[in-house]
Amino acid sequence: MNSEENGGSSYTMTAAVPNHDAIHPSTDFSETVLSKNGTADGKLADPEQAQSSAPVEINGGYGWICVLCVFLVNAHTWGINSAYGVFLAHYLDTNTFPGASDLDCAFVGGLSLSMAQFIAPVATITTRMWGTRVTLMIGITLQTAALLGASWAGQIWQLFLSQALCFGFGMGMQFSATVGIIPQWFTRRRSLANGIATAGSGIGGLIYSLATSAIIQKWGIGWAFRILAIVSAAACGFSAIIVRDRNKAIGAVQIAFHTELLRRPEFLLTLAWGCFSVLGYVALLFSIPDYATTVGLTASQGSIVGAMFNLGGGLGRPVIGYVSDSFGRLNTALACTFLAGLFSLVIWVFAKNFGVLLFYALISGPFAATFTTTVAPVGAEVVGLQLLPSALSIFWLSVVIPSTFAEPIALWLRTDNETNFLHAQIFVGFMFMAACICLGLVRAWKVSALSSSDADGDPLKQETQIRDDDAVPRESAVGTASSVPSITSKAKIVKGLFTMARV
């Protein structure tokens, strides 16, 4: 890969894509997809010639426009979903759907999250067939229809179809289409850019939580949904028009299920990190406002605590991204996951007044959402940019069940007529700690693999060797990762647990 500095702060890409076989052992179906972007002999043609005659600047330039687009998409998808607590409180207070239980209404929020993950493989397929922009437009259409349908819902099953299923599908189509774009535009500041983009969900959650409550009080819940539909369609439509991916430039493998990844132990550990993290995050997200009322605070104060949780995530994610670029993406994700569990066990358990709860919400917001903030950069470290779209599809599908049942589990763990949250708090803390252990093993694998790479122990040479595709190079003679590791490789992984390295 040839590159030259442009103004000391960015790179201009002018060469072809790295050899796919030298980095990842291929299966027949992945090679078929790659050959569609290449020449008749199966080799990739110059990707930038296929897209544009002008070279593309990375680490800046149009990449920051794409960051803005992804920020807006996150703010008007996940941000709206984060405001579901406001709708839930209205449903329960006014008995909007006669005959529906509290658990029925609570499941709507969980289902919208899980359906967003479930639709990810479909979004990967549509991106491969029709491109990112068409996938975004499909998602915008579904989300707008869902919000409009919910505005006229009179029975609980209609709410399940609209605000749970259809909204979740629309949100997932947009998120899956955009989540892998930022890593394609940045190398040196990848995590910072990704942190800014994912901060949209926290900022959007803060704004929509406060705005939705005011709209419901003034114009009713029907118009609240319709206004959300209009605003989100406009913002996401604008983003869909101007966002641009580099799938062809990097030879991205747009396969919904790249089954070879499931034979890699490090990838399975990354999936486990995601599942445990989501169990802790979703249970915390939906429990903390309700917890506030059980310790003597008002419902209004509980909503403020929830808003501060979103604010903490919105402000903290860019900082986490900046630190991640400086100290390593795996290192930062590991530390943040550990802190999320630690804060839950040593602060939330003992938070009995408004001030301490606000403090906990602000500092736990960015750390609790570590998985969604760092999943794309961490995924690039584990599987590389070319296989990242497929890896992300598997990531989202793997957290469908945790997203759906995290809050019911937390509800079931409450005691004393659902007013004692101690068991739920311990559950949240231990889920983050389990996620920390899994990611620690992934980090150990990365350190041991880097030490075995052909870089003569030079960290700078190692970084240069894998910079354009962050997965550790795999020798084609080794075959797939399904082979049993040797005693030597196991020893290196154990050593990697205690090795200081920027990974």
Image (cartoon, rainbow, N blue to C red):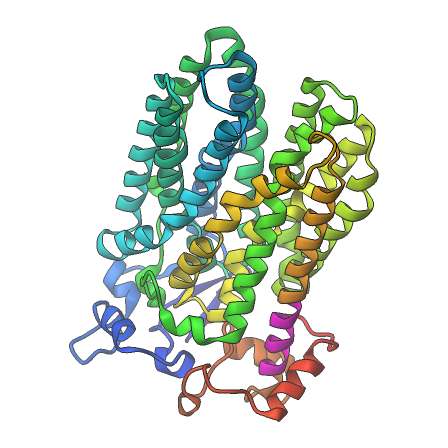
Q: Does residue 502 appear to the left or right of 295 in the view shown? A: left
Magenta range is: 440-450
Quadrant for residue 25, please give it. Answer: bottom left
Q: Residue 193, percent across and down?
A: 54, 51
Q: Does residue 328 appear to the left or right of 250 in the view shown? A: right
Q: Residue 119, percent across and down?
A: 36, 48
Is residue 44 visible in this depiction of the protein? Answer: yes
Q: Residue 408, percent across and down?
A: 57, 39
x 75%, y 34%: residue: 420
Q: Residue 380, percent across and down?
A: 49, 65
Determine whether 374 is above or below 29 in the image: above
Determine whether 284 is above or below 63 in the image: above
x 35%, y 81%: residue: 21
Residue extending furthest toward the top? 218
Q: Does residue 368 appear to the left or right of 380 in the view shown? A: right
x 41%, y 20%: residue: 225
> In this view of the protein, which residue sits in the foreground, 23 or 99?
99
> In this view of the protein, which residue sits in the foreground, 126 or 251?
126
The C terminus lies in quadrant: bottom right
